[in-house]
Amino acid sequence: MAAIVGAAETLDAGASEDAQLRRSFLDILLRHAQRLAQLTTDLLDIARLEAGYRPRTESVPIAEVIETVTASLRSRADERRISLVSQSAGHFAVQAERAAVEQILTNFVENAVKYTPEGGRISVQALRKKDMIALEVEDNGPGIAAEHLPRLFERFYRVDNARSRELGGTGLGLAIVKHLALANGGDVRVESTVGQGSKFSVLLPSA
C-alpha cells in the first residue's frame, strides 16, 4: 500500500507530465496493485479453508488435470526457455475436488517456473503409492537448503523474502496447498538439494 500511495502522490505532484517518469510510476502502481489483489485472494482462500471447507469430491482423472495446468502455464515457461514436460499419467484418478487438485498443481508449477533459471527443465508426473496417487513437480532450479524444508508450508514463510516479493509471491500459496491437500484426505511433501533442484508432491486418495 505504501508503494501504491507513494507512486500516486508522485504522479499527482507533477511526474505525470514527464512521459518516461509517468510510465515508470504507472508500472509501479500496476505491479503493486496486482500483488495486493493476489494477497487479498490468498487471504480469502485461507479464511474459507479455516472456516470449515468441505470439498465436494469426485473421481478426477489426473491426466486431464495435468494437461489443463501445463497448457495454461506453457507460455510463461516458453518465455523463459524452460522445458515443461509431463509424463503419462495413465488411467490414474484421485477422489478429490477437481478445483482443489488444479489449484495445488498450478501452485507447484507456477513456483517452479518462477524459480527455475532460463533454459531449465520442469517435469510433471503421477505415480501410484499404495492406495494414494502422488502428483509430483520436479525442477532443476537452485534448490532449497535443508533447514527451510520443514517450514515451507507455513503461511508467510519465505526462503528469500526479497526475491519472493520481486517475483510477486504472497507467502500464502504453499499454506493454501497444504490446507487443500489435508482437507481432501491427502498430504504434501518436498524434497530439495541446493544446486540440483526441488520436487514438490501432493498425495491424494486413489479413486
Image (tube, rainbow, N blue to C red):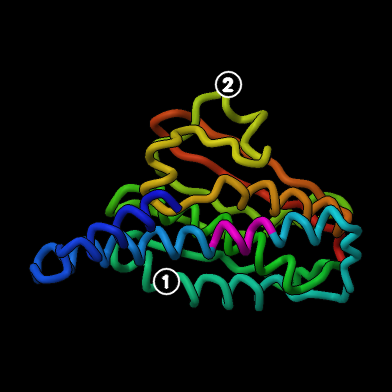
The mark total stands at: 2
Q: Position of residue 97 (x, y in %)?
A: 81, 71
* Three-letter residue code for mark 1: Arg
- The label on residue 14 is none
Local crowd size for mark 2, using a 10 Å CA cut-off: few (<14), some (14–19), many (≥20) = few
Q: Residue at x 74, y 66 (%)?
A: 100
Residue name at image x 66 percent, y 60 percent: 104
Query: In the rendered image, which quarter is residue 133 located in?
Result: bottom right
The one nearer the camera, 202 or 10, is: 10
Say left or right for 165 vs 55.
left
Name which residue type carries label 2: Glu
Q: Given this view, does label 2 or label 1 mark the residue nearer the observer?
A: 2
Residue at image coords 36%, 47%:
166
Left-right relation of 179 to 76: right
The answer to the question of whether label 2 and label 1 lie on touching residues, with beta carbons closer than 8 A, is: no
Q: Is residue 5 left or right of residue 127?
A: left
Q: Write down the region rendered in magenta.
A: 38-43
Residue at disc 2, secondary structure: helix
- Residue 195 pos. (x, y %): 39, 31
Q: Spot the residue most to the top.
A: 147
Q: Which residue is mark 1?
A: 74
Give the quarter of the image for residue 135.
Answer: bottom right
Nearer to us in this view, 110 or 200: 110
129 shown above or below 107: above
- Looking at the image, is mark 2 or mark 1 earlier in the sequence? 1
Q: Residue under circle 2? A: 147
How many other residues sit within 10 Å of disc 1, few (<14), some (14-19) or many (≥20)? some
C-alpha separation, residue under disc 2 versus residue under disc 1: 31 Å
Q: Which quarter of the figure has residue 13?
A: bottom left
Does dot 1 land on a helix, a strand or a loop? Answer: helix
Q: Residue shown at 54%/34% (left/top)?
A: 192
